[in-house]
Every structure is written in structure tokens, then in C-alpha cells.
Image (tube, coloured by chain):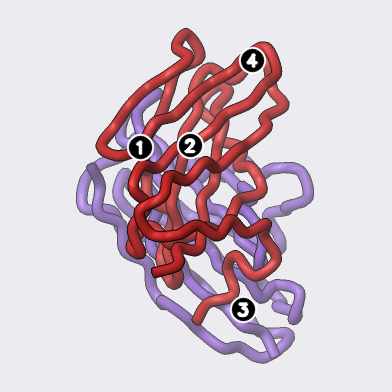
């Protein structure tokens, strides 16, 4: 299994500002993902974080709004840029240790934008 | 409490009864299916999985059934306990990418 930590665990931010969320894993993993979970809803994949290269974004998500870094096999960041109240969500980091193995989730970062 | 699950369908069961949570999936190419449990304030936690070449898999108090003909997945929880109260999500995998279903909130009455 993998132990995943996220920082911050929650934050309240002002409209127009940006927040960077960190994801740290206790072991090297093959794949890292970022998901969004809007209030009362299921999980939606934002992007796959690729080590040393640009992330792969899903339809509806763009790099300018959600820049992602993954400098090594255990760490990734997601930035929510120029925030609006519609960005209020839980943001979750997820990892796969080996291809086609189980996918684990972090505890999430609860973001509220005023 | 957290807002996860506020607008999701809710299944209410009596403690000790069996629970059945259903999920419909859409992608015929999905080769792997997973059930996750999400408690308030936490990330999703893996419960049980099943590969597309199986139709049933049992774990401790949980059973997953897969019907590929009608693209239906179910999670059965035996002797439901208060600690089972959570939101349950099914997910399907295609090419190592997970797609999540809408989720069901399970409430266990003492």
C-alpha cells in the first residue's frame, strides 16, 4: 500500500488568488493523479501528473488554471489559479504503485473560495 | 460534517441487515472494477475489486457482483454495522484510467 499526505488539509481563500496543494507519498509510485470532488458529487479526474514533463489534462481542465508539477516519483503539486467560488471543492491526490495495481487516494484538500 | 454525499442517493438500513449498493457502468472496454468507501472528511478507501473475467468476488463481509451483459455492478455488505456508514463509489478502469460512478450514501440505523 501507499501512505499519501496532502497539504494543506483545508483552506479558505479569497477570489482571484491561487493556492498550491502538495501531495507526498511514502514510496515511489508509477502514476500520480489529481481529482476534484465538488460538493455532493463524485470524483472527476483533472489530470495525470507526469514526472519531468507536462501533465496530461482531461477534457475541461487546462494547464493555465491547474498547473501541475511532478519533480520526482514521490511528490506532486496542483495549483488552483485565479480562484472563484466555483473552485470550492475537495482536491484529491491519487497514486498507482505499479501499472494495473490498486489505486490509492490521499485524504484530500478542502478548498473554500469566498 | 463535510458536504460529500449531500446530494447523492441514500440507502438507509438497519444495523445487522444486509446492504446492496448498485452501480451501472458504461464502458464495455473496462477491464477492472473497484468499490471505494469514503467516510466524512477522508479520501476514498479501497474496499474490493473485480476483474472483467469474473462475475463474483468475496471479501470479508463484502461481495461484489459483476454482470457484464447489462453493465451492472453491485456491492453487498453482510451484517451492516454503524461503521459502514459512508458514501460508496464504484469505479471502472480502462487503460489504467479510473472513471467514477455517482456514488451512494449508506446510512446505518442502530
Q: Distance from label 4 to label 2 (Cα)?
A: 21 Å
Drawn side of residue A70 relative to residue A80, left or right: left
Q: Is mark 2 on a helix, strand or loop?
A: strand
Q: What shade does chain B have? A: red
Tell me if label 3 and label 1 are in contact, CB under 8 Å.
no
Which chain is assigned purple? A
Residue A12 falls left or right of residue A69: right
The alpha-carbon separation of the residues under discs 2 and 3 comes to 40 Å
Q: Can marks 2 and 3 be said to lie on one chain?
A: no
Image coordinates of residue A68 in percent, x first then y, are 54, 56
Q: Which chain carries label 1?
A: B
Residue A18: numbered disc: 3
Label 2–label 1 contact, CB within 8 A: yes
Question: Which element is circle 4 on?
Answer: loop
Quarter holding residue A37: bottom right
Residue B60 percent across, percent down from the top left: 25, 37
Amino acid at each position: 500500500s501507499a501512505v499519501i499526505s496532502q497539504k494543506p488539509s483545508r483552506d479558505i481563500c479569497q477570489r482571484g488568488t491561487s493556492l498550491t496543494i502538495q501531495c507526498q507519498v511514502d514510496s515511489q509510485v508509477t502514476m500520480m493523479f489529481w481529482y476534484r470532488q465538488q460538493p455532493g458529487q463524485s470524483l472527476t479526474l483533472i489530470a495525470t501528473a507526469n514526472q519531468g514533463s507536462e501533465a496530461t489534462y482531461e477534457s475541461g481542465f487546462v494547464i493555465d488554471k491547474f498547473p501541475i508539477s511532478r519533480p520526482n516519483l514521490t511528490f506532486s503539486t496542483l495549483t488552483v489559479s485565479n480562484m472563484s467560488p466555483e473552485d470550492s471543492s475537495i482536491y484529491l491526490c491519487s497514486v498507482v504503485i505499479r501499472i494495473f495495481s490498486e489505486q490509492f487516494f490521499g485524504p484530500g484538500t478542502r478548498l473554500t473560495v469566498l | 460534517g463535510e458536504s460529500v454525499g449531500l446530494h447523492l442517493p441514500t440507502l438507509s438500513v438497519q444495523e445487522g441487515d444486509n446492504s446492496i449498493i448498485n452501480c451501472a457502468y458504461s464502458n464495455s472496454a473496462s477491464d477492472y472494477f473497484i468499490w471505494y468507501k469514503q467516510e466524512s472528511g477522508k479520501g476514498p478507501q479501497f474496499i474490493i475489486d473485480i476483474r472483467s473475467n469474473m462475475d463474483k468476488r468475496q471479501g470479508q463481509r463484502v461481495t461484489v457482483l459483476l454482470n457484464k451483459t447489462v453493465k451492472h455492478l453491485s456491492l453487498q455488505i453482510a451484517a451492516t454495522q454503524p461503521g459502514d456508514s459512508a458514501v460508496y463509489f464504484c469505479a471502472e478502469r480502462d487503460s489504467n484510467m479510473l472513471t467514477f460512478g455517482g456514488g451512494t450514501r449508506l446510512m446505518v440505523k442502530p
